[in-house]
Amino acid sequence: MTYKIIRIDGRDDELTAQSFENYSDAYDLLDELYGDLCCSDADYGDITYYDIVENNLKNINGE
């Protein structure tokens, strides 16, 4: 199973172009980039929100 990061607003960026072998790799990347944000430090209008989902793309060869 592979995972990908999606943006809540549906747009694509350099994070959404990647796929990950496991959930924790995707989580670790988001934590590294955004883990230092604290609620009191955040300007909520400028934050891009992400989610981690299973990558359900089917194999093109039908395997």
Image (spheres, rainbow, N blue to C red):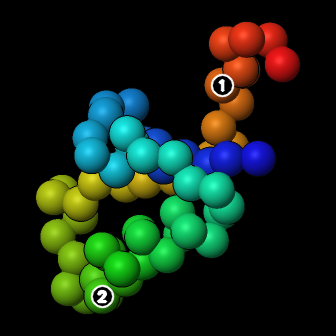
Name the residue located 80 percent from the left edge and 11 percent from the top edge.
62
Mark toward the start of the polypeptide (2 vs 1) = 2
**Dot 1 crowding, Cα within 10 Å, few <14, some 14–19, many 20+:** few
| Residue topped by disc 2 | 36
Left or right: 6 as drawn, with respect to 24? left
Name the residue located 62 percent from the left edge and 49 percent from the top edge.
3
| Residue topped by disc 1 | 57
Quadrant in which the C terminus appears = top right
Q: Position of residue 46 (x, y in %)?
A: 15, 58
Name the residue located 18 percent from the left edge and 57 percent from the top edge.
45
Residue 7 visible within the image: no
Q: How many marks?
A: 2
Front position among marks 2 and 1:
1
Residue 10 vertical position relative to residue 43 in the rendered view, above or below? above
- Disc 2 to disc 1, how far (Cα)? 32 Å
Q: Position of residue 4 (x, y in %)?
A: 54, 46
